[in-house]
């Protein structure tokens, strides 16, 4: 009977340890930002431009690298709290329900202010057709 209890305890301990290691590995591999394009369409009356609607998700505690958008971007924060750090300006904090506008080629980065919860935004971009939505800056 003691042997069965010891075996059960050992199995449970190993299982918990593997679960913790697996969770840490998954979190370490998570990208700071994920952009899911919901709609990409030509815009009537605006030759050569397209509109893109995307769901942007920021991993807990993550910060994007400095980047810019070639087109106009308008965003609505759905969940979480983020800090928008525009190059040469003081950071601005946004919470759910806040909106913001990024003019073309304005270098910035975004940081999720929570270390445990993701942040989510809905972003609408108007840009030249077939251009990347973001351009990294070194």
Image: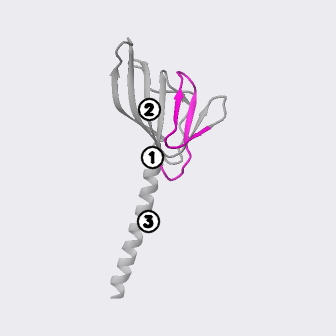
User: Marks 1 and 2, how far apart in space?
Assistant: 24 Å
Per the rendered image, the range of residues in magenta is: 92-118
Dot 2 corresponds to which residue?
123
Which quadrant, please, contains the N terminus?
bottom left
Q: CA distance from mark 3 to mark 2?
A: 39 Å
Q: Which residue is rendered at x = 47% and y = 47% of the image?
A: 118
Taking the spot 38% from the left edge, 67% from the top edge, the residue there is 15
Would you call the spot at circle 2 few (<14 residues within 10 Å), some (14-19), or many (20 or more)?
A: many
| CB under 8 Å between discs 3 and 2 | no
| Nearer the observer, 67 or 78 | 78
Badge 3 element = helix
Q: Residue at position x 33%, y 29% from top?
A: 39
Q: Quadrant of residue 108?
A: top right
Mark 1 and mark 2 lie on one chain; the one further toward the N terminus is 1
Q: Residue 56 location in percent, x, y?
A: 43, 37
| Quadrant in which the C terminus appears | top right
N-terminal label among 3 and 2: 3
Of helix, strand and loop, which one carries label 2? strand
In this orientation, does residue 55 appear?
Answer: yes
Using the image as rendered, state which of residue 60 and residue 93 is in the foreground.
Answer: 93
Residue 65 % position (x, y): 55, 34
* Residue labelled with disc 3: 17
Which residue is the site of mark 1?
29
Q: Which mark is residue 95?
A: none
Q: Residue at x 53, y 37 (%)?
A: 64
Q: Position of residue 37 (x, y in %)?
A: 36, 32
Relative to 5, residue 96 above or below: above
**Callout in the foreground (1, 2):** 2
């Amino acid at each position: 009977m003691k042997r069965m209890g010891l075996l059960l305890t050992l199995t449970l301990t190993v299982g918990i340890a593997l679960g913790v290691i697996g969770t840490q590995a998954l979190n370490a591999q998570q990208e700071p930002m994920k952009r899911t394009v919901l709609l990409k369409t030509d815009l009537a009356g605006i030759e050569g431009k397209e509109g893109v609607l995307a769901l942007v998700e920021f991993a807990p505690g993550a910060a994007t690298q400095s980047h810019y958008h070639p087109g106009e971007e308008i965003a609505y924060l759905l969940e979480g709290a983020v800090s928008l750090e525009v190059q040469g300006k003081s950071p601005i904090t946004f919470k759910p329900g806040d909106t913001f506008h990024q003019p073309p080629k304005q270098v910035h980065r975004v940081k999720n202010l929570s270390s445990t919860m993701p942040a989510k935004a809905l972003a609408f971009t108007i840009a030249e057709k077939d251009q990347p939505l973001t351009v990294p800056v070194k």
